[in-house]
């Protein structure tokens, strides 16, 4: 949009009100385009939905280079969280039918066995599906050769392409909980109890059991721990606890509460102190700096205005989140040609992480909008609280806007408060102006824009790009202040973190006994969610002893203070039969020994 190219030249020079008026007009125009862009990519009526079934979000209509005609649980859930919020706050009362279609589509996907497993063996962690709601089996599309080759391919494929992405179930739970809360306050608890809660429970049980295993990050590149994943898991469990208690589902509450505390504890470990360049590590692996928009996205997607500027939940106005944002944007100053020669308080084009090479490694629209959104969220809280606190940690951030500011609490009546908030609003707007500058005349938002000349690149009409524009605009006009709290307020970090690995790798000896009649050649094996139980592997399941036939037994050391799920498997001549659902579950205590007596189901 040329208007904005002109406006940008005046940034810092032209008067602020002209600048903000042109932002207003971009927001008004692009808001409408972005909303229809989102709806166009949702089946079955969306104009660009590529034959997707009802309620299915297509990531982008781009069919080649890259082919994004798939539905990712992460993207779909973020998009529908935005739509449910619009519905629940009355911004768009027409969305209910579409939301109900999303619910049905996700109910089907939860039950769809896929390369990550079945519903009880890790299938919920599968990142993407075909838009006709079948499992994505990518490499299987190639001509198949011999049986052995197929098995080998299956293993390699599983390891390389289909490791679980544990943010999907958490984000889906959050979208469904938001809808549930609206239904309950509109006297439709029946639908929540009968349809939504069972889906939410599957996702939250998955989170509760798996959060402390490594995960592929939201970019599906690094298998390590990911701050975004932990933060959205934490949020989902907290709001799940509140919903469970409203619905009288008390049996779930204590394990969710225990694991939410454990995740909150773990989240603190991502902080990377480095003086004025400190940041929240996005991913712990991959041989990168760890600076990543992952953390800013975590902050805006777990924003809770009631929690003020709380740092332990990384609220947008917390000192840690502000310093992280500064470190993050600065990391692109020398990376993208677009940023060369820009002033220290001018908006910088930002991407996923400075080391990115995907499609040439460019700025992303979602990343640029995220910077603005975090700052608008922060401004909202400072305005609510009628004061703003500068700490020694956040000082480098605030110094961009007043170089002589010192740590302290500034009431809204002070000059410093006015100077800072006015400048920060303008700084946030300049990120919208930057996105505007690189938005083509049509208003279409692709995935990326070129690092040197700003031309839109990679997948066109990316649903998530549109959704990120809309949530940034909602934060700018304050309509997101009506979104309900998820319970971030008043939390404290437990004194010690309890983990899958137990205190110090301590374990309790658990003897599994199961009564099972077998035929000649048939054996009973054990597998389950813990490493010591081979993480749901059929091939590496543990052979049990038949010394006391028909009771089969085995003793395994399992990590203390954890919840473990398991099943018995019958294997006869290489062919495996699993026990029927649901999984068996035990809580491993802090000490002692445990003996279980089960009967084959
Ligand atoms: C409750 O909500 C569901 C989902 O929109 C709807 O199908 C159902 O008719 C509603 N029930 C009542 C009593 O309004
Ligand atoms: C599990 O939790 C512990 C302690 O919080 C942490 O040190 C470890 O890195 C976590 N592992 C994963 C994969 O999340
Ligand atoms: C900058 O901050 C200092 C310290 O709080 C304050 O005295 C001064 O008035 C501020 N400058 C402006 C322009 O607000
Ligand atoms: C705020 O922005 C959103 C997103 O563009 C829009 O849908 C909504 O109508 C706006 N609300 C107001 C009160 O301007």
Image: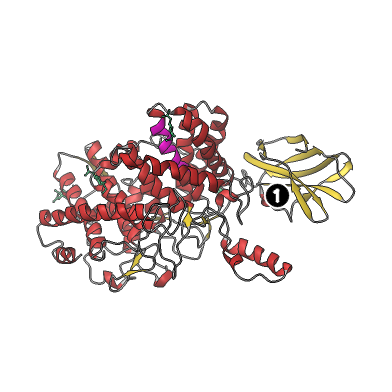
Instruction: Answer left or right for 480 relative to 256.
Output: left
Q: Is the CB atom of the residue marked by disc 1 within 8 angstroms of ligand 2's nearest atom?
A: no
Instruction: Answer left or right for 271 relative to 574.
Output: left
| Front residue (pair 540, 323) | 540
Please name the predominant secondary structure of the magenta segment in the image. helix
Q: Which residue appears at 36% of the width and 45% of the height?
A: 83
Residue 456 found in image quarter: bottom left
Quadrant the N terminus occupies: bottom left
Does the segment drawn in magenta span residue 334?
no
561 over 147 or under it: above or below: above
For disc 1, the neighbor class at 10 Å (few under 14, some 14 to 19, many from 20) is: some
| Front residue (pair 545, 76) | 76
Q: Which residues are magenta?
A: 173-183
Can see residue 484? yes
Instruction: Answer left or right for 443 relative to 277.
Output: left
Q: Where is residue 598 drawn, in percent x and y?
A: 77, 35
Residue 86 found in image quarter: top left
| Front residue (pair 212, 437) | 437
Residue 90 found in image quarter: top left
Does the segment drawn in magenta span residue 177?
yes
Q: Where is residue 463 drawn, in percent x and y?
A: 37, 56
Q: Where is residue 567 drawn, in percent x and y?
A: 71, 43
Tell me the residue that label 1 is attached to.
532
92 over 215 or under it: above or below: above
User: What kind of element bears circle 1?
Assistant: helix
Q: Where is residue 432 drawn, in percent x and y?
A: 24, 57
Q: How is the image coloured?
A: secondary structure
């Amino acid at each position: 949009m040329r208007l904005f190219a002109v406006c940008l030249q005046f940034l810092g020079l032209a008067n602020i009100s002209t600048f903000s008026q042109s932002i207003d007009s971009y927001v008004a125009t692009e808001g409408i385009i972005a909303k229809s862009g989102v709806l166009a990519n949702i089946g079955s009526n969306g104009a660009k939905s590529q034959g997707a079934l009802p309620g299915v979000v297509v990531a982008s209509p781009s069919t080649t280079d890259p082919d994004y005609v798939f539905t990712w649980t992460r993207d779909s859930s973020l998009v529908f969280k935005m739509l449910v919020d619009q519905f629940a706050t009355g911004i768009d009362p027409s969305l209910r039918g579409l939301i109900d279609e999303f619910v049905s589509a996700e109910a089907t996907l939860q039950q769809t066995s896929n390369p990550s497993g079945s519903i009880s063996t890790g299938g919920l962690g599968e990142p993407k599906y075909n838009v006709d709601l079948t499992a994505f089996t990518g490499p299987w599309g190639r001509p198949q050769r011999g049986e052995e080759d197929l098995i080998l391919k299956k293993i390699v494929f599983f390891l390389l392409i289909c490791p679980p992405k544990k943010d999907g179930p958490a984000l889906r739970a959050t979208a469904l909980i938001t809808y549930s809360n609206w239904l309950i306050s509109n006297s439709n608890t029946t639908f929540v109890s009968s349809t939504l809660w069972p889906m939410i429970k599957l996702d939250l049980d998955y989170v509760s059991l798996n959060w402390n295993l490594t995960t592929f990050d939201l970019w599906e590149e690094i298998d390590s721990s990911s701050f975004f994943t932990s933060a959205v898991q934490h949020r989902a469990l907290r709001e799940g606890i509140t919903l469970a208690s409203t619905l009288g589902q008390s049996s779930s509450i204590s394990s969710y509460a225990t694991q939410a505390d454990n995740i909150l504890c773990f989240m603190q470990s991502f902080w990377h102190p480095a003086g004025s360049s400190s940041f929240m590590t996005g991913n712990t692996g991959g041989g990168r700096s760890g600076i990543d928009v992952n953390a800013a996205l975590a902050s805006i997607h777990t924003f809770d205005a009631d929690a003020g500027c709380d740092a332990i939940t990384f609220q947008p106005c917390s000192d840690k989140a502000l310093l992280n944002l500064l470190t993050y944007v600065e990391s692109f100053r020398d990376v993208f040609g677009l940023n060369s020669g820009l002033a220290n308080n001018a908006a910088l084009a930002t991407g996923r992480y400075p080391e990115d090479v995907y499609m040439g490694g460019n700025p992303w629209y979602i990343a640029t909008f995220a910077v603005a959104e975090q700052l608008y969220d922060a401004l909202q809280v400072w305005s609510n609280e009628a004061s703003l606190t500068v700490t020694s940690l956040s000082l480098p951030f605030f110094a961009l806007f007043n170089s002589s500011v010192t740590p302290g609490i500034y009431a809204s009546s002070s000059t410093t408060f006015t100077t800072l908030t006015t400048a920060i609003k303008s700084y946030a707007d300049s990120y919208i102006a930057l996105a505007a500058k690189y938005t083509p005349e049509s208003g279409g938002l692709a995935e990326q824009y070129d690092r040197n000349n700003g031309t839109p690149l990679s997948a066109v009409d990316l649903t998530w790009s549109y959704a990120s524009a809309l949530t940034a605009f909602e934060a700018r006009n304050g309509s997101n202040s009506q979104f309900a709290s998820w319970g971030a307020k008043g939390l404290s970090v437990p004194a010690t973190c309890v983990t899958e690995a137990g205190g110090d790798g301590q374990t309790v000896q658990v003897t599994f006994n199961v009564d099972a009649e077998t035929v000649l050649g048939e054996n009973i094996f054990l597998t389950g969610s813990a490493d010591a139980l081979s993480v749901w592997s059929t091939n590496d399941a543990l052979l049990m002893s038949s010394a006391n036939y028909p009771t089969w037994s085995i003793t395994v050391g399992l990590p203390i203070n954890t919840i473990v799920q398991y099943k018995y498997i019958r294997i006869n001549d290489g062919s495996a039969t699993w026990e029927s659902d649901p999984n068996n579950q035990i809580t491993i205590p802090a000490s002692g020994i445990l003996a279980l007596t089960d009967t084959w189901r």
